[in-house]
Image (spheres, rainbow, N blue to C red):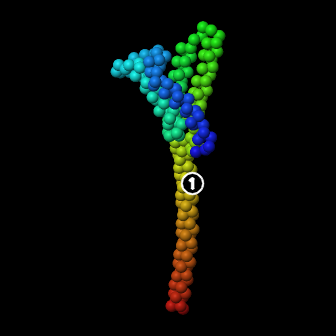
Amino acid sequence: MSAVRILARPLLGSSFIVAGVGKLKNADDTAEHLSPVLRRAADALPVQVDEKLLARAVGASQLGAGLLFALGKAPRLSASVLALTSALNAFVEWRSADISTPVGREARRSGLLKNLSLLGGVLLASVDTAGRPSIAWRAQNLASGTAKASRRQLASAEKSIASAQKGTGKALRKAARRAERTVRSAAKETADTASGIFA
């Protein structure tokens, strides 16, 4: 792991860890802020779930994924979870911000930019392979290498077959010439013998 990753992961994960702890400590406030989203999530679930419990689950997932990411354990998976929670935070904070004053509108804009920056960071981290090729690249490379090796083996086999056919043809022509010479020699000997007998 590079020094940049060793330093950057805890820095990026720390914001999510602190936010997750805050959500767990203040589950009532979190449920109130997240209530429009949580209400829809609770309605979509097949069982009845308390909004406060869902708020705790969001906080726990943010805390757990932040810790895993900061420690470099399952960084792509934890970054993906953090991306989801970051998008949720950006939406909720933007929606619940006070925009009645110019200061409130400025705070809303700053909060949105902060959340979008964090979202961008964890999205990049979710596709970072730490210098190692991804599974998709490895599969594609393996398929490409296998296809090249198959084409090389097929070309080699075709060349061997052509060589064998060529060699077989030469061997047959040589054998035919040898046989022809043998027949001529035998015919000459027979003729010589016959002429000696009849002479």
Residue under numbered circle 1: 152
Q: Is residue 40 visible?
A: no
- Residue at 50 percent across and 35 percent down: it is 67
Secondary structure beneath disc 1?
helix
Q: Is residue 199 visible?
A: yes
Please give left or right for residue 3 compared with residue 16 in the image: right
**Would you place residue 188 above or below residue 100 in this image?**
below
Observer-nearest residue: 178 or 85?
85
Observer-nearest residue: 159 or 121?
121
- Residue at 44 percent across and 18 percent down: it is 28
- Residue 177, position in %: x, y? 57, 73
Please give left or right for residue 102 compared with residue 78 in the image: right
From the image, which quarter does the N terminus lie in?
A: top right
* View extreme (front): residue: 25
* View extreme (top): residue: 100
- Residue 131, position in %: x, y? 59, 44
- Residue 94, position in %: x, y? 56, 16
**Would you place residue 155 above or below residue 16 in this image?**
below
- Asked which quadrant contains residue 140, the reply is top right
- Residue 58, position in %: x, y? 46, 25
Observer-nearest residue: 19 or 9?
19
> At label 1, which amino acid type do we have?
Arg
- Asked which quadrant contains residue 170, the reply is bottom right
Residue neighbourhood size for the residue with mark 1, other residues' Cα within 10 Å, grouped as few (<14), some (14–19), many (≥20): few
